[in-house]
Image (cartoon, rainbow, N blue to C red):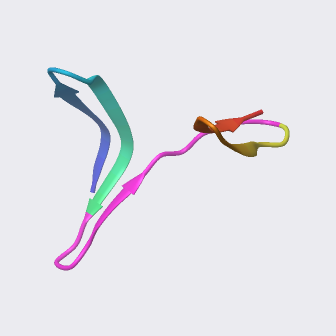
Amino acid sequence: MITDLTLHHPALGAVQLDTVIVTNSKILLLEVKNIHGMLELESTPARMAS
């Protein structure tokens, strides 16, 4: 298990992952948010909005 992992990509910049769990057969990437209220999925552009 790896927590608070930051990856750097020259074209994309930095990406922060909350938790990465590596097993013999799977890699799980977890991003945890603490957001109050209702979230809606918008399709154009694809994003979550509150």
Viewer-nearest residue: 13 or 18: 13
* Most common SS among magenta residues: loop
Q: Horizontal placement of 10 versus 35: left or right?
A: left
Image spot of residue 7 (x, y percent): 22, 32
Which residue appears at 77% of the width and 33% of the height? Answer: 50
Q: Is residue 13 magenta?
A: no
For residue 34, say whether it is visible. Answer: no
Viewer-nearest residue: 19 or 41: 41
The span picked out in magenta is 22-36
Q: Is residue 34 magenta?
A: yes
Identify whether 18 is placed above or below 24: above
Which residue appears at 85% of the width and 38% of the height? Answer: 37
Identify whether 32 is placed above or below 49: below
Image spot of residue 1 (x, y percent): 27, 57
Q: Quadrant of residue 29?
A: bottom left
Image spot of residue 13 (x, y percent): 26, 20
Q: Horizontal placement of 38 versus 11: left or right?
A: right
Which residue appears at 26% of the width and 73% of the height? Answer: 26
Q: Horizontal placement of 41 versus 4: left or right?
A: right
Q: Please give the count of numbered marks on the rendered protein.
A: 0
Image spot of residue 33 (x, y percent): 60, 39
Q: Residue furthest front?
A: 44
Q: Residue furthest right?
A: 37
Which residue appears at 17% of the width and 27% of the height? Answer: 9
Q: Quadrant of residue 34?
A: top right
For residue 10, say whether it is visible. Answer: yes
